[in-house]
Amino acid sequence: MGMHQDRDERSDAPVVSVSLGDACVFRFGNTETRARPYTDLELGSGDLFVFGGPSRMAYHGVPRTRPGTAPPALGLRGRVNITIRASGLAP
């Protein structure tokens, strides 16, 4: 998934992201541009990443996954991401 911002939301509540399955490189950038500076972090199965406050509008993405790294007991091939957020949009 390319670098992007979550601009369609009208909430400043933190974003909570849970990774399951294969590990990935999660790229967490700045609020101004998709370019550097950014930080690459490896997220493994079961890792939780939370970003809020001034970082809520940071560009972020997953440039690659690491196939075959999921815990065998999980019985999952590939990577699943569960993202929890408050959109701030009216129902």
Image (tube, rainbow, N blue to C red):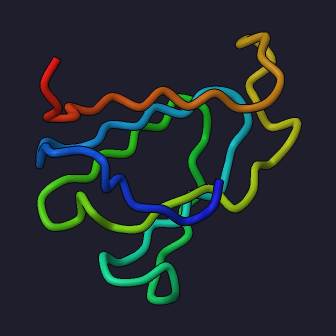
Find the residue positioned furthest to the bottom.
Answer: 36
Placement of 3 over or under 68, stated as above or below: below
Q: Nearer the viewer, residue 9 or 42?
A: 9
> Residue 88 appears at what percent x and percent y?
14, 35
Residue drawn 69% across the image and 43% down it: 23
Q: Kindly indicate the quadrant of the structure image that contains residue 58.
A: bottom left
Q: How many marks?
A: 0
Placement of 62 over or under 82, stated as above or below: below
Residue drawn 81% across the image and 18% down it: 72
Find the residue positioned furthest to the right.
Answer: 68
Find the residue positioned furthest to the front.
Answer: 90
Placement of 17 over or under 58, stated as above or below: above
Q: Kindly indicate the quadrant of the structure image that contains residue 16.
A: top left
> Residue 62 appears at what percent x and percent y?
62, 56
Residue drawn 80% across the image and 37% down it: 69
Quadrant of the image for the C terminus? top left
> Residue 78 appears at what percent x and percent y?
79, 30
Residue drawn 42% across the image and 83% down it: 33
Q: Is residue 52 shown left or right of residue 79?
A: left
Q: Is residue 61 shown left or right of residue 11?
A: right
> Residue 52 appears at what percent x and percent y?
19, 53
